Amino acid sequence: MKTILWATLTANGNYAQSGANNPPTKEALNDFAAQAAAAGNFIVGRKTFEAMRGSGGGGPFAEVDIVVVSKNASEIPGVTVVRSPQEALTCLQQKGHQTALISGGADIHNSFLGEGLVDEVIFNVAPVLEGKGLNLLIDKDNYEYKHVQLLDCKPLGGGVIQLRYAIER
């Protein structure tokens, strides 16, 4: 199964944290909806899922399999809840998916990266600088390097640039 990690970064390289003062750009959100529709699924952490869900309703994800990775939640209506990144991939594979889209947050991204479960990354670089931020890590304890190959680079509009890389596994 091909796994694609999708994230928004700030122009100074931090993992972009969305909030009331820094909402996600519409260009990045539109791209995420298109990527999720193409994959037919996405994997997300519980906190990020709850923030995404807002007032409910199907919206652009009504026909998409959503898998929430959580060590605490036992059941969330309308989605599959699993305990680990590998369990999330196994679940989607059993449903017949060929591609898994990993969408956030930083803890989920770092879990998949740390376990070497990511084939590609899509970084949407937002036109904002962030003072204190989170980082995406392939190994939180060592200074490890992984070589990547640029697959695509394109502007999404609104100053957002998308970079797509294959990760050497």
Image (cartoon, rainbow, N blue to C red):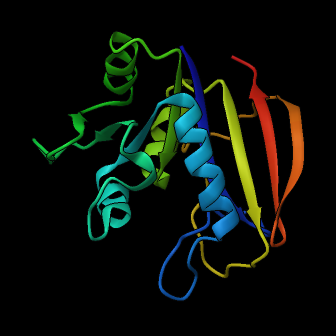
- 100 vs 58, left or right, is right
- 163 vs 124, left or right, is right
User: Residue 164's x, y, as percent?
Assistant: 79, 39
User: Residue 157's x, y, as percent?
Assistant: 83, 65
User: Residue 126's x, y, as percent?
Assistant: 74, 68
Count all numbered tags in the image, as a single digit.
0
Q: Nearer the viewer, residue 86 or 62?
A: 62
Residue drawn 64% across the image and 69% down it: 26
Residue drawn 77% across the image and 27% down it: 166
Residue drawn 59% across the image and 60% down it: 29
Q: Nearer the viewer, residue 112 or 65?
A: 65
**Quadrant including the C terminus:** top right
Residue 33 seen anywhere in this rendered image of the structure: yes
Q: Nearer the viewer, residue 6 or 154?
A: 154
Give the answer, above or below, for where 32 lies relative to 13: above
User: Residue 2's x, y, as percent?
Assistant: 59, 18
Residue drawn 58% across the image and 82% down it: 22
